[in-house]
Image (spheres, rainbow, N blue to C red):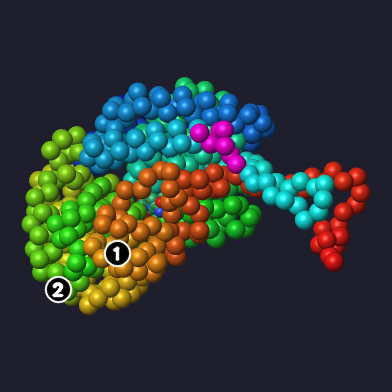
Amino acid sequence: MNKHKLFLNGEWLDSAAGETFEDINPATLETIGLFQKGSMDDVNHAVDSAEEAFDSWSRTPPPQRAKILYRAARLLEERKEELARLMTMENGKVLPEARGDVQEAIDMAYYAAGEGRRLFGETTPSELPNKFCMTVRRPIGVVGLITPFNFPLAIPAWKIMPALVSGNTMVLKPSSDTPLLAVELIKILSHAGVPEGVINLVTGVGGEAGTALIKSRKVKAISFTGSLETGKWILSESGKDMKRISLELGGKNPIIVMDDAKIDLAVDGVLWGAFGTTGQRCTAASRVIVEEKVLPEFQRKLILRAKGLKAGSGLDESVDMGPLINGGQLAKVERYVQIGADEGARLVYGGSRINPLPGYFFLPTIFTEVTAEMRMAQEEIFGPVLSLIRAEDLSQAIEIANSVAYGLSSSIYTENIKNAFQAIERLDAGITYVNAPTIGAEIHLPFGGVKATGNGAREAGTTAIDEFTDLKTVYFDYSDRLQKAQIDTQN
Ligand code: NAD
Protein backbone atom coordinates (compact mmCIF):
# COMPACT_ATOMS: atom_id res chain seq x y z
CA MET A 1 0.00 0.00 0.00
CA ASN A 2 1.20 3.50 -0.85
CA LYS A 3 2.57 5.39 2.12
CA HIS A 4 2.57 9.15 1.69
CA LYS A 5 4.66 11.75 3.50
CA LEU A 6 4.54 15.28 4.80
CA PHE A 7 6.14 18.02 2.71
CA LEU A 8 8.38 20.12 4.94
CA ASN A 9 10.95 22.61 3.70
CA GLY A 10 11.01 21.00 0.27
CA GLU A 11 11.45 17.43 1.55
CA TRP A 12 9.02 14.51 1.78
CA LEU A 13 9.29 13.28 5.39
CA ASP A 14 7.62 10.96 7.88
CA SER A 15 5.82 12.64 10.77
CA ALA A 16 7.91 13.20 13.89
CA ALA A 17 5.85 10.68 15.87
CA GLY A 18 5.81 8.19 12.99
CA GLU A 19 2.03 7.80 13.21
CA THR A 20 -0.17 7.27 10.16
CA PHE A 21 -3.85 7.10 9.25
CA GLU A 22 -5.78 5.39 6.46
CA ASP A 23 -7.52 7.08 3.55
CA ILE A 24 -10.69 5.17 2.62
CA ASN A 25 -12.52 4.97 -0.72
CA PRO A 26 -16.11 5.78 0.37
CA ALA A 27 -17.63 3.76 -2.49
CA THR A 28 -15.80 0.49 -1.80
CA LEU A 29 -14.46 0.98 1.75
CA GLU A 30 -11.01 -0.09 0.48
CA THR A 31 -7.95 1.66 1.88
CA ILE A 32 -6.30 3.69 -0.84
CA GLY A 33 -3.23 4.86 1.05
CA LEU A 34 -1.51 5.53 4.35
CA PHE A 35 -0.88 9.15 5.32
CA GLN A 36 1.22 10.80 7.99
CA LYS A 37 -0.64 11.91 11.07
CA GLY A 38 1.06 15.25 11.66
CA SER A 39 1.31 16.67 15.15
CA MET A 40 2.44 19.93 16.75
CA ASP A 41 6.13 19.10 16.10
CA ASP A 42 5.46 18.71 12.39
CA VAL A 43 3.37 21.87 12.24
CA ASN A 44 6.15 23.81 13.99
CA HIS A 45 8.67 22.43 11.50
CA ALA A 46 6.39 23.49 8.64
CA VAL A 47 5.77 26.96 10.06
CA ASP A 48 9.50 27.54 10.74
CA SER A 49 10.28 26.54 7.15
CA ALA A 50 7.63 28.91 5.81
CA GLU A 51 8.93 31.72 7.99
CA GLU A 52 12.47 31.15 6.77
CA ALA A 53 11.35 31.18 3.13
CA PHE A 54 9.24 34.33 3.45
CA ASP A 55 11.94 36.97 2.96
CA SER A 56 13.15 35.64 -0.36
CA TRP A 57 9.71 34.68 -1.75
CA SER A 58 8.05 37.94 -0.77
CA ARG A 59 10.83 39.87 -2.56
CA THR A 60 10.63 37.76 -5.73
CA PRO A 61 8.94 39.96 -8.37
CA PRO A 62 5.29 38.92 -8.71
CA PRO A 63 5.59 38.22 -12.48
CA GLN A 64 8.35 35.69 -11.61
CA ARG A 65 6.12 34.10 -8.99
CA ALA A 66 3.36 34.00 -11.60
CA LYS A 67 5.53 32.04 -14.05
CA ILE A 68 5.56 29.17 -11.55
CA LEU A 69 1.78 29.30 -11.31
CA TYR A 70 1.45 29.15 -15.10
CA ARG A 71 3.66 26.05 -15.08
CA ALA A 72 1.52 24.52 -12.31
CA ALA A 73 -1.63 25.23 -14.34
CA ARG A 74 -0.16 23.43 -17.35
CA LEU A 75 0.89 20.43 -15.21
CA LEU A 76 -2.62 20.25 -13.74
CA GLU A 77 -4.04 20.30 -17.26
CA GLU A 78 -1.75 17.50 -18.40
CA ARG A 79 -2.79 15.35 -15.44
CA LYS A 80 -6.48 16.34 -15.38
CA GLU A 81 -7.98 12.95 -16.17
CA GLU A 82 -5.63 11.05 -13.83
CA LEU A 83 -6.31 13.49 -10.97
CA ALA A 84 -10.07 13.30 -11.57
CA ARG A 85 -9.97 9.51 -11.29
CA LEU A 86 -7.94 9.66 -8.08
CA MET A 87 -10.46 12.17 -6.71
CA THR A 88 -13.42 9.94 -7.51
CA MET A 89 -11.68 7.10 -5.66
CA GLU A 90 -10.84 9.24 -2.67
CA ASN A 91 -13.89 11.48 -2.36
CA GLY A 92 -16.60 9.50 -4.16
CA LYS A 93 -17.87 12.30 -6.41
CA VAL A 94 -18.78 11.16 -9.93
CA LEU A 95 -16.14 11.54 -12.64
CA PRO A 96 -17.67 14.51 -14.51
CA GLU A 97 -17.82 16.41 -11.21
CA ALA A 98 -14.27 15.37 -10.31
CA ARG A 99 -13.11 16.69 -13.70
CA GLY A 100 -14.91 19.92 -12.87
CA ASP A 101 -13.10 20.11 -9.52
CA VAL A 102 -9.71 19.72 -11.26
CA GLN A 103 -10.75 22.27 -13.90
CA GLU A 104 -11.54 24.77 -11.15
CA ALA A 105 -8.00 24.36 -9.82
CA ILE A 106 -6.59 24.87 -13.34
CA ASP A 107 -8.72 27.96 -13.86
CA MET A 108 -7.69 29.40 -10.50
CA ALA A 109 -4.00 28.77 -11.23
CA TYR A 110 -4.24 30.68 -14.54
CA TYR A 111 -6.38 33.42 -13.01
CA ALA A 112 -4.07 33.97 -10.03
CA ALA A 113 -1.02 33.85 -12.31
CA GLY A 114 -2.52 36.75 -14.25
CA GLU A 115 -2.51 38.73 -11.00
CA GLY A 116 1.29 38.59 -11.09
CA ARG A 117 1.13 41.45 -13.59
CA ARG A 118 -1.66 43.29 -11.78
CA LEU A 119 -1.75 43.17 -7.96
CA PHE A 120 -3.22 46.62 -8.35
CA GLY A 121 -3.15 49.34 -5.75
CA GLU A 122 -4.74 52.77 -6.21
CA THR A 123 -3.46 56.21 -6.97
CA THR A 124 -5.49 59.22 -5.97
CA PRO A 125 -4.93 62.99 -5.77
CA SER A 126 -3.64 64.56 -2.59
CA GLU A 127 -5.44 67.44 -0.94
CA LEU A 128 -2.05 69.23 -0.91
CA PRO A 129 0.22 70.39 -3.77
CA ASN A 130 3.41 68.49 -4.63
CA LYS A 131 2.27 65.39 -2.86
CA PHE A 132 1.50 61.97 -4.31
CA CYS A 133 -0.84 59.33 -2.76
CA MET A 134 -1.12 55.64 -3.51
CA THR A 135 -1.71 52.21 -2.04
CA VAL A 136 0.53 49.19 -2.55
CA ARG A 137 -0.08 45.56 -1.65
CA ARG A 138 2.14 43.57 0.67
CA PRO A 139 1.99 39.86 1.51
CA ILE A 140 0.86 38.97 5.03
CA GLY A 141 3.56 36.43 5.97
CA VAL A 142 3.09 32.79 6.92
CA VAL A 143 -0.51 31.77 6.25
CA GLY A 144 -2.29 28.62 7.44
CA LEU A 145 -4.73 27.03 4.98
CA ILE A 146 -7.27 24.54 6.34
CA THR A 147 -9.56 22.84 3.85
CA PRO A 148 -12.58 20.47 3.83
CA PHE A 149 -13.18 17.19 2.00
CA ASN A 150 -15.78 18.19 -0.56
CA PHE A 151 -13.57 19.98 -3.12
CA PRO A 152 -10.23 18.23 -2.55
CA LEU A 153 -8.35 20.11 -5.26
CA ALA A 154 -10.42 23.20 -6.02
CA ILE A 155 -10.59 24.60 -2.49
CA PRO A 156 -6.86 24.19 -1.72
CA ALA A 157 -6.17 25.81 -5.12
CA TRP A 158 -8.57 28.68 -4.36
CA LYS A 159 -6.38 29.47 -1.38
CA ILE A 160 -2.88 28.45 -2.48
CA MET A 161 -2.76 30.17 -5.89
CA PRO A 162 -3.71 33.70 -4.74
CA ALA A 163 -1.64 33.31 -1.56
CA LEU A 164 1.43 32.31 -3.62
CA VAL A 165 1.21 35.03 -6.24
CA SER A 166 0.74 37.59 -3.46
CA GLY A 167 4.08 36.55 -1.95
CA ASN A 168 3.02 34.64 1.18
CA THR A 169 4.51 31.39 2.37
CA MET A 170 2.19 28.73 3.74
CA VAL A 171 1.22 25.53 5.47
CA LEU A 172 -1.67 23.49 4.05
CA LYS A 173 -3.68 21.18 6.35
CA PRO A 174 -6.17 19.33 4.13
CA SER A 175 -9.13 17.24 5.29
CA SER A 176 -8.15 13.85 6.68
CA ASP A 177 -10.78 12.38 4.31
CA THR A 178 -8.99 13.68 1.20
CA PRO A 179 -5.23 13.96 1.79
CA LEU A 180 -4.26 12.25 -1.49
CA LEU A 181 -5.30 15.10 -3.79
CA ALA A 182 -3.48 17.55 -1.53
CA VAL A 183 -0.28 15.48 -1.85
CA GLU A 184 -0.68 15.45 -5.66
CA LEU A 185 -1.24 19.22 -5.76
CA ILE A 186 1.88 19.87 -3.68
CA LYS A 187 3.93 17.58 -5.96
CA ILE A 188 2.74 19.61 -8.95
CA LEU A 189 3.58 22.93 -7.30
CA SER A 190 6.99 21.64 -6.34
CA HIS A 191 7.66 20.39 -9.91
CA ALA A 192 6.49 23.75 -11.23
CA GLY A 193 9.29 25.38 -9.25
CA VAL A 194 7.85 26.67 -5.96
CA PRO A 195 11.03 27.10 -3.86
CA GLU A 196 11.59 24.98 -0.76
CA GLY A 197 9.84 26.17 2.38
CA VAL A 198 7.34 28.33 0.49
CA ILE A 199 4.64 25.68 0.61
CA ASN A 200 4.46 22.98 3.27
CA LEU A 201 1.97 20.18 3.74
CA VAL A 202 0.93 18.66 7.05
CA THR A 203 -1.68 15.91 6.74
CA GLY A 204 -3.47 14.77 9.86
CA VAL A 205 -6.59 15.22 11.94
CA GLY A 206 -8.17 18.58 12.62
CA GLY A 207 -8.02 18.40 16.40
CA GLU A 208 -4.26 17.87 16.32
CA ALA A 209 -2.51 19.25 13.21
CA GLY A 210 -5.24 21.83 12.57
CA THR A 211 -5.25 23.03 16.17
CA ALA A 212 -1.45 23.33 16.19
CA LEU A 213 -1.62 25.57 13.12
CA ILE A 214 -4.26 27.77 14.72
CA LYS A 215 -2.21 28.06 17.90
CA SER A 216 1.11 28.85 16.21
CA ARG A 217 2.07 32.45 16.92
CA LYS A 218 4.19 32.64 13.77
CA VAL A 219 1.13 32.08 11.57
CA LYS A 220 -0.19 35.52 10.67
CA ALA A 221 -3.41 34.56 8.89
CA ILE A 222 -5.73 31.59 8.66
CA SER A 223 -7.89 30.84 5.66
CA PHE A 224 -10.44 28.23 6.68
CA THR A 225 -13.20 26.47 4.76
CA GLY A 226 -15.31 24.00 6.70
CA SER A 227 -18.14 23.66 9.17
CA LEU A 228 -19.65 26.41 11.30
CA GLU A 229 -18.71 24.59 14.47
CA THR A 230 -14.99 24.44 13.61
CA GLY A 231 -15.07 27.97 12.20
CA LYS A 232 -16.46 29.40 15.45
CA TRP A 233 -13.74 27.71 17.45
CA ILE A 234 -11.03 28.98 15.10
CA LEU A 235 -12.38 32.53 15.29
CA SER A 236 -12.41 32.60 19.08
CA GLU A 237 -9.01 30.92 19.41
CA SER A 238 -7.25 33.04 16.76
CA GLY A 239 -8.51 36.28 18.23
CA LYS A 240 -6.12 35.73 21.14
CA ASP A 241 -3.05 36.57 19.04
CA MET A 242 -4.86 38.83 16.53
CA LYS A 243 -4.50 36.55 13.52
CA ARG A 244 -6.25 37.59 10.40
CA ILE A 245 -9.04 35.09 9.78
CA SER A 246 -11.18 34.32 6.77
CA LEU A 247 -13.96 31.83 7.18
CA GLU A 248 -16.04 30.08 4.51
CA LEU A 249 -18.58 27.99 6.39
CA GLY A 250 -21.87 26.16 5.91
CA GLY A 251 -25.09 26.84 4.08
CA LYS A 252 -28.81 26.03 4.07
CA ASN A 253 -29.43 27.23 0.58
CA PRO A 254 -32.95 27.89 -0.76
CA ILE A 255 -34.38 27.68 -4.25
CA ILE A 256 -37.63 29.62 -4.70
CA VAL A 257 -39.96 28.36 -7.42
CA MET A 258 -42.61 30.90 -8.43
CA ASP A 259 -45.86 29.90 -10.12
CA ASP A 260 -44.71 31.69 -13.28
CA ALA A 261 -41.50 29.60 -13.46
CA LYS A 262 -40.68 27.11 -16.19
CA ILE A 263 -41.39 24.07 -14.03
CA ASP A 264 -39.33 21.55 -16.00
CA LEU A 265 -36.34 23.90 -15.88
CA ALA A 266 -36.80 24.31 -12.11
CA VAL A 267 -37.01 20.53 -11.63
CA ASP A 268 -33.76 20.11 -13.59
CA GLY A 269 -32.08 22.77 -11.47
CA VAL A 270 -33.32 21.46 -8.13
CA LEU A 271 -32.25 17.93 -8.98
CA TRP A 272 -28.71 19.10 -9.76
CA GLY A 273 -28.58 21.61 -6.89
CA ALA A 274 -29.81 19.17 -4.25
CA PHE A 275 -28.32 15.84 -5.30
CA GLY A 276 -25.16 16.85 -7.22
CA THR A 277 -22.07 15.87 -5.18
CA THR A 278 -24.56 13.84 -3.07
CA GLY A 279 -25.67 17.10 -1.45
CA GLN A 280 -22.17 17.65 -0.06
CA ARG A 281 -21.60 21.16 -1.36
CA CYS A 282 -21.65 24.22 0.82
CA THR A 283 -23.93 25.70 -1.87
CA ALA A 284 -26.17 22.61 -2.19
CA ALA A 285 -29.90 23.38 -2.33
CA SER A 286 -31.45 21.81 0.75
CA ARG A 287 -34.72 23.77 0.75
CA VAL A 288 -37.10 24.35 -2.13
CA ILE A 289 -39.73 26.96 -1.40
CA VAL A 290 -42.56 26.55 -3.90
CA GLU A 291 -45.55 28.80 -4.55
CA GLU A 292 -48.60 26.75 -3.65
CA LYS A 293 -50.31 26.79 -7.05
CA VAL A 294 -47.46 24.88 -8.72
CA LEU A 295 -46.43 22.75 -5.74
CA PRO A 296 -48.35 19.57 -6.75
CA GLU A 297 -46.98 19.59 -10.32
CA PHE A 298 -43.45 20.46 -9.18
CA GLN A 299 -43.46 17.78 -6.48
CA ARG A 300 -44.77 15.06 -8.79
CA LYS A 301 -42.17 15.80 -11.47
CA LEU A 302 -39.30 16.10 -8.98
CA ILE A 303 -40.03 12.75 -7.31
CA LEU A 304 -40.24 11.07 -10.70
CA ARG A 305 -36.85 12.44 -11.70
CA ALA A 306 -35.23 11.66 -8.32
CA LYS A 307 -36.31 8.03 -8.72
CA GLY A 308 -34.37 7.94 -11.98
CA LEU A 309 -31.05 8.95 -10.39
CA LYS A 310 -28.52 6.13 -10.38
CA ALA A 311 -26.20 5.80 -7.39
CA GLY A 312 -22.94 3.86 -7.41
CA SER A 313 -19.22 4.13 -7.99
CA GLY A 314 -18.43 7.49 -9.54
CA LEU A 315 -15.96 5.76 -11.90
CA ASP A 316 -18.96 4.26 -13.72
CA GLU A 317 -19.91 6.96 -16.24
CA SER A 318 -23.59 6.01 -16.09
CA VAL A 319 -23.81 6.87 -12.37
CA ASP A 320 -25.40 10.17 -11.25
CA MET A 321 -24.63 10.14 -7.52
CA GLY A 322 -21.71 8.79 -5.52
CA PRO A 323 -21.52 7.93 -1.81
CA LEU A 324 -21.30 10.16 1.24
CA ILE A 325 -17.78 10.80 2.43
CA ASN A 326 -17.67 8.64 5.57
CA GLY A 327 -19.63 6.65 8.13
CA GLY A 328 -20.08 9.67 10.40
CA GLN A 329 -21.71 11.66 7.61
CA LEU A 330 -23.96 8.70 6.72
CA ALA A 331 -25.08 8.43 10.35
CA LYS A 332 -25.74 12.19 10.45
CA VAL A 333 -27.97 12.00 7.37
CA GLU A 334 -29.90 9.07 8.88
CA ARG A 335 -30.33 11.06 12.09
CA TYR A 336 -31.85 14.00 10.22
CA VAL A 337 -34.25 11.73 8.35
CA GLN A 338 -35.50 10.55 11.73
CA ILE A 339 -35.64 14.12 13.06
CA GLY A 340 -37.71 15.16 10.01
CA ALA A 341 -40.16 12.31 10.54
CA ASP A 342 -40.42 13.09 14.27
CA GLU A 343 -41.12 16.75 13.49
CA GLY A 344 -44.07 15.81 11.26
CA ALA A 345 -42.51 16.25 7.81
CA ARG A 346 -43.64 13.67 5.24
CA LEU A 347 -41.02 11.46 3.57
CA VAL A 348 -42.09 11.04 -0.05
CA TYR A 349 -38.96 9.47 -1.51
CA GLY A 350 -35.72 7.88 -0.26
CA GLY A 351 -34.79 8.06 3.40
CA SER A 352 -32.54 5.01 3.59
CA ARG A 353 -29.14 3.56 2.78
CA ILE A 354 -28.72 1.83 -0.54
CA ASN A 355 -28.13 -1.85 0.02
CA PRO A 356 -26.34 -3.97 -1.06
CA LEU A 357 -23.80 -1.34 -2.20
CA PRO A 358 -20.81 -1.68 0.17
CA GLY A 359 -20.00 2.05 0.52
CA TYR A 360 -21.65 4.98 2.26
CA PHE A 361 -24.57 5.25 -0.17
CA PHE A 362 -27.86 6.97 0.64
CA LEU A 363 -30.93 7.43 -1.55
CA PRO A 364 -31.85 10.90 -2.80
CA THR A 365 -34.39 11.89 -0.18
CA ILE A 366 -37.36 14.26 -0.41
CA PHE A 367 -39.55 15.50 2.42
CA THR A 368 -42.75 17.49 1.88
CA GLU A 369 -44.94 19.36 4.38
CA VAL A 370 -41.79 20.84 5.87
CA THR A 371 -42.26 24.11 7.72
CA ALA A 372 -39.66 26.84 8.03
CA GLU A 373 -38.90 26.38 11.71
CA MET A 374 -38.30 22.60 11.64
CA ARG A 375 -34.74 21.55 12.41
CA MET A 376 -34.42 19.85 9.04
CA ALA A 377 -35.23 23.19 7.41
CA GLN A 378 -32.82 25.12 9.62
CA GLU A 379 -29.68 23.00 10.10
CA GLU A 380 -27.07 21.98 7.55
CA ILE A 381 -27.37 18.23 6.85
CA PHE A 382 -24.72 18.01 4.10
CA GLY A 383 -26.29 15.06 2.32
CA PRO A 384 -28.90 14.27 -0.33
CA VAL A 385 -31.89 15.41 1.73
CA LEU A 386 -34.28 18.00 0.34
CA SER A 387 -37.13 19.80 2.12
CA LEU A 388 -40.10 21.12 0.14
CA ILE A 389 -41.73 24.13 1.79
CA ARG A 390 -44.98 25.76 0.66
CA ALA A 391 -45.23 29.56 0.28
CA GLU A 392 -48.24 31.78 -0.45
CA ASP A 393 -46.35 34.41 -2.42
CA LEU A 394 -42.90 35.89 -3.07
CA SER A 395 -42.81 37.86 0.17
CA GLN A 396 -43.45 34.79 2.26
CA ALA A 397 -40.98 32.76 0.18
CA ILE A 398 -38.24 35.33 0.82
CA GLU A 399 -39.11 35.46 4.52
CA ILE A 400 -38.77 31.66 4.74
CA ALA A 401 -35.55 31.73 2.71
CA ASN A 402 -34.06 34.30 5.09
CA SER A 403 -35.21 32.52 8.27
CA VAL A 404 -32.03 30.43 8.72
CA ALA A 405 -28.71 31.22 10.39
CA TYR A 406 -26.71 30.76 7.17
CA GLY A 407 -26.53 32.96 4.06
CA LEU A 408 -24.36 31.45 1.33
CA SER A 409 -26.23 30.79 -1.91
CA SER A 410 -29.84 31.27 -3.07
CA SER A 411 -31.88 30.99 -6.21
CA ILE A 412 -35.20 31.93 -7.77
CA TYR A 413 -36.98 30.41 -10.74
CA THR A 414 -39.33 32.94 -12.30
CA GLU A 415 -40.17 34.40 -15.70
CA ASN A 416 -41.13 37.71 -14.08
CA ILE A 417 -38.29 40.22 -14.04
CA LYS A 418 -39.76 42.08 -11.05
CA ASN A 419 -39.80 38.91 -8.96
CA ALA A 420 -36.18 38.29 -9.94
CA PHE A 421 -35.01 41.74 -8.87
CA GLN A 422 -37.00 41.56 -5.63
CA ALA A 423 -35.16 38.34 -4.84
CA ILE A 424 -31.74 39.77 -5.75
CA GLU A 425 -32.43 42.73 -3.46
CA ARG A 426 -33.99 40.93 -0.51
CA LEU A 427 -32.42 37.47 -0.20
CA ASP A 428 -29.86 37.42 2.63
CA ALA A 429 -27.12 35.52 0.81
CA GLY A 430 -23.69 36.09 -0.67
CA ILE A 431 -24.83 34.61 -3.99
CA THR A 432 -28.18 34.71 -5.85
CA TYR A 433 -28.87 32.78 -9.06
CA VAL A 434 -31.81 33.53 -11.33
CA ASN A 435 -33.20 30.53 -13.24
CA ALA A 436 -30.24 28.38 -12.24
CA PRO A 437 -29.63 26.25 -9.13
CA THR A 438 -27.61 27.35 -6.09
CA ILE A 439 -24.40 25.64 -7.23
CA GLY A 440 -21.89 26.43 -9.97
CA ALA A 441 -19.56 29.24 -8.90
CA GLU A 442 -17.20 30.66 -11.53
CA ILE A 443 -13.71 31.41 -10.26
CA HIS A 444 -13.44 35.00 -11.51
CA LEU A 445 -16.31 36.17 -9.30
CA PRO A 446 -16.19 36.69 -5.54
CA PHE A 447 -17.44 33.72 -3.49
CA GLY A 448 -18.69 33.76 0.08
CA GLY A 449 -21.68 34.31 2.28
CA VAL A 450 -23.34 36.45 4.91
CA LYS A 451 -24.57 35.73 8.45
CA ALA A 452 -23.17 32.47 9.92
CA THR A 453 -21.65 31.43 6.58
CA GLY A 454 -18.57 33.51 7.20
CA ASN A 455 -16.97 36.62 8.56
CA GLY A 456 -17.22 38.79 5.47
CA ALA A 457 -14.30 37.35 3.51
CA ARG A 458 -14.75 36.62 -0.19
CA GLU A 459 -12.59 34.11 -2.00
CA ALA A 460 -11.95 33.98 -5.77
CA GLY A 461 -12.42 36.90 -8.16
CA THR A 462 -10.50 40.09 -7.54
CA THR A 463 -11.25 39.64 -3.82
CA ALA A 464 -9.00 36.55 -3.75
CA ILE A 465 -6.01 38.87 -3.58
CA ASP A 466 -7.58 40.96 -0.79
CA GLU A 467 -7.64 37.85 1.39
CA PHE A 468 -3.89 37.39 1.13
CA THR A 469 -2.50 40.92 1.04
CA ASP A 470 -2.32 43.94 3.30
CA LEU A 471 -2.73 47.37 1.82
CA LYS A 472 -0.13 49.99 2.61
CA THR A 473 -1.08 53.61 2.06
CA VAL A 474 1.80 55.77 0.84
CA TYR A 475 2.02 59.57 1.05
CA PHE A 476 4.94 60.96 -0.94
CA ASP A 477 5.61 64.64 -0.27
CA TYR A 478 7.97 66.38 -2.71
CA SER A 479 7.15 69.98 -1.71
CA ASP A 480 10.33 70.52 0.35
CA ARG A 481 8.29 72.04 3.17
CA LEU A 482 6.17 70.75 6.04
CA GLN A 483 2.63 70.43 4.74
CA LYS A 484 -0.09 69.70 7.28
CA ALA A 485 -3.02 67.69 5.99
CA GLN A 486 -6.44 68.91 7.13
CA ILE A 487 -4.79 72.13 8.38
CA ASP A 488 -2.95 73.72 5.44
CA THR A 489 -6.01 73.13 3.23
CA GLN A 490 -8.43 75.05 5.48
CA ASN A 491 -9.70 78.35 4.09
P1 NAD B 1 -14.82 20.35 9.06
O1 NAD B 1 -15.07 21.64 9.75
O2 NAD B 1 -15.11 19.10 9.79
O3 NAD B 1 -13.30 20.24 8.60
C1 NAD B 1 -12.70 21.21 7.78
C2 NAD B 1 -11.20 21.20 8.04
O4 NAD B 1 -10.97 21.67 9.37
C3 NAD B 1 -10.55 19.83 7.96
O5 NAD B 1 -9.26 19.95 7.38
C4 NAD B 1 -10.44 19.42 9.41
O6 NAD B 1 -9.43 18.48 9.64
C5 NAD B 1 -10.12 20.76 10.06
N1 NAD B 1 -10.42 20.84 11.49
C6 NAD B 1 -11.36 20.17 12.19
N2 NAD B 1 -11.30 20.53 13.50
C7 NAD B 1 -10.31 21.46 13.62
C8 NAD B 1 -9.77 22.20 14.70
N3 NAD B 1 -10.23 22.06 15.93
N4 NAD B 1 -8.78 23.06 14.44
C9 NAD B 1 -8.31 23.24 13.18
N5 NAD B 1 -8.77 22.54 12.12
C10 NAD B 1 -9.76 21.66 12.34
O7 NAD B 1 -15.63 20.39 7.67
P2 NAD B 1 -15.81 19.23 6.58
O8 NAD B 1 -16.76 18.21 7.11
O9 NAD B 1 -14.48 18.78 6.06
O10 NAD B 1 -16.51 20.04 5.41
C11 NAD B 1 -17.87 20.26 5.33
C12 NAD B 1 -18.22 21.65 5.79
O11 NAD B 1 -17.51 22.61 5.02
C13 NAD B 1 -19.69 21.99 5.57
O12 NAD B 1 -20.18 22.69 6.68
C14 NAD B 1 -19.66 22.87 4.34
O13 NAD B 1 -20.77 23.73 4.22
C15 NAD B 1 -18.39 23.62 4.54
N6 NAD B 1 -17.89 24.17 3.28
C16 NAD B 1 -17.98 25.52 3.09
C17 NAD B 1 -17.57 26.08 1.90
C18 NAD B 1 -17.66 27.56 1.67
O14 NAD B 1 -16.94 28.06 0.80
N7 NAD B 1 -18.49 28.31 2.38
C19 NAD B 1 -17.05 25.26 0.89
C20 NAD B 1 -16.97 23.89 1.12
C21 NAD B 1 -17.38 23.36 2.33
- Residue 154, position as x, y percentages in the image: 38, 40
The amino acid on which the numbered mark 1 sits, given as a three-letter code, is Ile
Tag shown at residue 293? 2
- Residue 191, position as x, y percentages in the image: 47, 22
Q: Real-space Cα distance between discs 2 and 1?
A: 19 Å
Task: Give 330 or 37, whichever is nearer the viewer.
Answer: 330
Write down the residue under mark 1: 417
Tell me which segment is drawn in magenta. 114-120
Between disc 2 and disc 1, the foreground one is 1
Rendering quarter of residue 30: top left
Q: Could you classify mark 2 by the number of other residues whose Cα lies within 10 Å: few (under 14), some (14-19), or many (20 or more)? A: some
Task: Give 53 or 273, whichever is nearer the viewer.
Answer: 273
Point 13% across, 64% down: residue: 298
Vertical side of 297 occupied by 138: above or below: above
Magenta stretch: dominant secondary structure: loop
Task: Give 204 or 140, whichever is nearer the viewer.
Answer: 140
Point 30% across, 55% down: residue: 438
The amino acid on which the numbered mark 2 sits, given as a three-letter code, is Lys
Horizontal relation, residue 57 to residue 311: left or right: right
In terms of secondary structure, where does tag 2 sit?
helix
In terms of secondary structure, where does tag 1 sit?
helix
